[in-house]
Structures are given as C-alpha cells and as structure tokens.
C-alpha cells in the first residue's frame, strides 16, 4: 500500500505542511521555557540545612506588593521583572535554634531568565535564659499585664495600687489606688487585673481584690477620658462579691478573659488546712472554683450574665461555676493557639500540681480535697472516678519548694525555641522551669538555672506575649535570652 501522504493532491500537501510549521512555531519547538519577547521571569530558591519535618521561615517580597512565604525549596514562575528581597527567620527545633544565612538578600529577576538564591540553616548554641530587670522599688508586685496592642506594662502592688511602666519608666502617679478598700492581712490585697478585649474602645478593666471584711470582690472600672495613664476613680461597678468569712488565706486571685471572650476567675477554697468546710467539692458555693461570667453588657441592674455552656446553669449548683475541686488556683493561663487551659493549684503539705485541659471542657473536677496531686488526701484510698488528674506534680519539700507559682505558655517572638512550653516557678525556691504538653502528656521538663531572685509572687505577660517574673524583693524581671 502506498503511503497516505502520497495520495494527497499537491495543494492539500502544501497546506498541511504550512499548518505543521505554524504549530511548531506556536509551541516554541517544545524546549525553550522563555520564548523571545517574554515579559516574566522565574526564581529558584533553595532552602537547606533543615532536619526532616522542620519548616523554614523564608519570605520573598518584590514589585507591586508581591509577598510569599516559603517553607521549603521551590521554583517560582511568572514573576514580574525587578528587585526582590528574600528574608529568612530563625526556626526552633526543641530547645535548639536553627539560624539562617544570609538573613536577607537581594535578587534580580529578569524577563525571560531564571534567577536563583539560597538560604542555609544551621544550629546555634542551645537556648539559655536570663532575667533582665525592668522595674524596681515596687511594694509587693503581685501581677503584671497589658491591654491588647499596648506597649505599656501595668504592675499591681498588693497593698492596692496599679502602677504604669511606660518606655522603661515607672510613672509616679498610680493608674489606680484602692489601698483604702483593702488590707494585706494574710493573703489579702489587690490580686489581679484583666483588661477587656475591647479596652481600646470601651476603656473597661476588671480587678480582683479582697475588701476590708475579707470577702472577694470582682469589680469593673474604666480609664479616665482625659488621661490614658489614670483610671476614673468614680467608675467602679461591683460585678460579684464572694463571702470568705473565716480565714485570711486561699483567695485564689486571677482574672482573665478566655478565648471565648468571657471573664474567668479562680477562687481559693476558703482557707485553713484541708478545706474544713468542704467548699471545693460543693457546687453550691463559689470557693475552690473556676468561674465564668459574661460581663460584656454589665450594668448596675445586672452586673453579669451566665454564658452558654456553664455546666451547672441548668443542672443544680451555682450557674457561675465552670470547674471545681480546686484548693488555691493562684495563677492559671489560657494557651489560645493550642486551646488549652493550664491551672497551677497550690498544694496542701505534700504536692504542687499543674492541671491541663481543653479550654472548652466544662464541669471538670480537679480533685481537691479528695486528692492532693496524684495521691489520695489523708487517706490510703479514695474514689477517683470522674476526677481530672494533674499533668505534672512536684513534692513540697526543701529540695523543690513550698508553693507553685503558675506562669504562661510562651507565645512571644524573641525566644522561638520556647514556643509552646509552659513556664512556672515556686514561691519559696524561685527557680524557673518549663515543660511541653501534647497528646495528654507533659514532657521535656527543663530547669533554666535561674536563682537568687527572691520569692516569686507571680508571672506576667505583655501585649507581645513576652513573659516576666515578679519578685518579693520589689523587682520585675523580663525573661530573656542569656
């Protein structure tokens, strides 16, 4: 059989040949990625030195507000010609930092060509921590916090004053002074401060203190209209007063807004040893509890509402209660990225503990006074059914300490190696330790070698999520890289 093409008329054969040549021209021969007259270019970026499973932190910016974040080697195509900036940040692997070289570089992308750039990561020295003094001369600094997005630090003095640290200077005039409303007998005083999430627009903040009768008071106040560093002295609205009639210890003492926007408060069991009134296990009283309140529309007639989801709102018990079975939850913390709640509960005589649970888990019974730590309290055996056991404990003794001071999960930017680790201390020993928590287990307990800073009264967190330690010596320290 003769070939098919030999049977075509000459005119048809010529037409077919022209079409084939046109098709080849349109395809550029199938090999040249950048045909003559190309208006864009490519950029190959190599990111090396990272262990398997560790992502880089590289950002490319360029013409027309171009920005792209990269975690691994890649080739970017169809880029507009011009100058691009490649910026790389350190990444953490456990307690080790992997640093990039170079940190920044310029790359020129040319139309019709492929440019290249590289970033190489390498391990730096293991992280070591130190304390940097940021304030001194304070009278029992008991808490530190900041409004969202604010560079100032607000430091509470237990006798009843809130001081402002602005640009490294401790302002002489207090933000608020309620020293006439409280006393420092036992564990009493001004204990906590929480700024409303919309503080920038509404100026509301909430304080937790003990009144002259020894009762717990949660109160809303407002910043003055003419001075951002002074509160309006006439703005007080009492949210809740909790009777604490017999003993002058175990007040709990922290206010905090959870990720759901509701105000939480940690209360102690009423004091003395062993919870003689049985308050912690009694859901008809507000002592020994974590409370959850809606204060977003507070007014005199209705200072607070009960948020949806509070476990005893419709099932008996006080509707304000979120969790119970706590002895003295002096400090607790929400870790928003992981959606976990950490509660440092001060022990009786033998065990200090940290409890960790999901933030949305309501009705937890943390065990006091049935248990202390992982052990039955004053009994060889006890019914542990339905109790939440601690994630970590340490013995109450000369070697370890006497009273846990809870801190925060680190979510700042200055110490990326610490990301996700919970930091805590002990009032007596003054050490600084941390642990990681995942899959229901605590691990990687680390002692950071901090000593000789006095009794640790509290931790603090600024608006950038950097952490501080507050000492009974009247000093405030920021936790920094050594």
Image (tube, grey):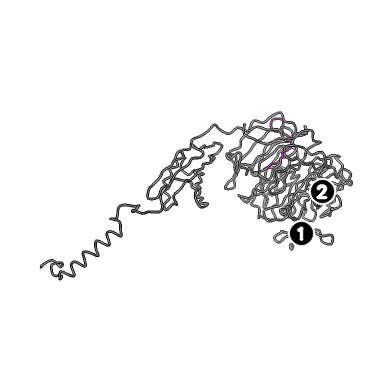
> What residue range appears in magenta?
398-407
Residue sitting nearer the eye, 15 or 268: 15
Residue sitting nearer the eye, 434 or 5: 5
Quadrant showing the N terminus: bottom left
Of the two numbered discs 2 and 1 in the rendering, the one whose residue sits closer to the viewer = 2
Residue behind mark 1: 319
Q: Is residue 45 magenta?
A: no
Kind of element beneath mark 1 = loop
- State whether residue 172 appears in this view: yes
**Left or right of 231, for residue 441:** left
Residue at 83% x, 50% y: name it: 232
**Left or right of 318, for residue 122:** left
Q: Which mark is residue 145?
A: none
Residue 191 horizontal/vertical position (percent) = 79, 44
Most common SS among magenta residues: loop
Q: Which mark is residue 231?
A: 2
**Which residue of the protein is positioned furthest toward the front in this rendering?**
37
Quadrant showing the C terminus: top right
């Amino acid at each position: 059989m003769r070939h098919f093409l030999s049977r075509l008329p000459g005119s048809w054969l010529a037409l077919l040949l022209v079409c084939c040549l046109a098709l080849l021209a349109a395809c550029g021969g199938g090999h040249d990625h950048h045909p003559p007259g190309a208006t864009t270019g490519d950029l190959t970026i190599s990111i090396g030195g990272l262990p398997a499973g560790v992502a880089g932190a590289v950002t490319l910016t360029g013409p027309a507000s171009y920005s792209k974040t990269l975690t691994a080697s890649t080739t970017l195509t169809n880029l507009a010609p011009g100058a691009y900036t490649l910026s790389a940040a350190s990444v953490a692997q456990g307690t080790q930092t992997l640093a990039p070289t170079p940190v920044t570089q310029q790359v020129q992308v040319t139309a019709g060509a492929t440019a290249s750039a590289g970033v190489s990561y390498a391990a730096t020295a293991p992280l070591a921590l130190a304390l940097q003094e940021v304030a001194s001369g304070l009278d029992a600094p008991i808490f530190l916090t900041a409004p969202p997005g604010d560079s100032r630090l607000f430091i509470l003095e237990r006798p009843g004053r809130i001081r402002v640290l602005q640009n490294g200077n401790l302002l002489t005039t207090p933000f608020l002074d309620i020293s006439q409303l409280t006393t420092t007998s036992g564990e009493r005083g001004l204990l906590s401060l929480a700024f409303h999430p919309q503080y920038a627009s509404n100026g509301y903040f909430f304080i937790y203190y003990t009144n002259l009768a020894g009762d717990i008071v949660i109160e809303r106040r407002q910043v003055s209209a003419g001075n951002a560093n002074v509160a309006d002295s006439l703005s007080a609205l009492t949210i809740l007063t909790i009777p604490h009639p017999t003993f002058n210890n175990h007040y709990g003492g922290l206010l905090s807004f959870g990720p759901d926007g509701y105000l939480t408060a940690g209360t102690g069991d009423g004091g003395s040893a062993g919870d003689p009134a049985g308050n912690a296990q009694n859901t008809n009283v507000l002592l020994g509890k974590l409370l959850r309140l809606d204060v977003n529309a507070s007014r005199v007639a209705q200072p607070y509402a009960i948020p949806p989801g509070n476990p005893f709102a419709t099932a008996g018990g006080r509707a304000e209660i979120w969790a119970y079975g706590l002895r003295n939850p002096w400090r607790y913390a929400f870790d928003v990225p992981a959606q976990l709640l950490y509660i440092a509960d001060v022990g009786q005589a033998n065990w200090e503990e940290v409890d960790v649970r999901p933030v949305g888990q309501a009705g937890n019974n943390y065990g006091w006074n049935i248990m202390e730590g992982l052990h039955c309290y004053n009994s060889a055996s006890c019914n542990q059914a339905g109790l939440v056991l601690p994630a970590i404990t340490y013995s109450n003794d000369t070697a370890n300490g006497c009273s846990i001071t809870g801190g925060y999960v680190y979510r700042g930017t200055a110490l990326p190696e610490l990301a996700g680790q919970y930091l805590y201390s002990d009032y007596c020993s003054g050490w600084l330790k941390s642990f990681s928590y995942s899959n229901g287990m605590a691990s990687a307990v680390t002692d950071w070698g901090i000593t000789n800073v006095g009794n640790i009264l509290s931790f603090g967190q600024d608006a950038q999520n950097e952490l501080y330690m507050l000492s009974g010596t009247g000093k405030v320290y920021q936790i920094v890289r050594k």
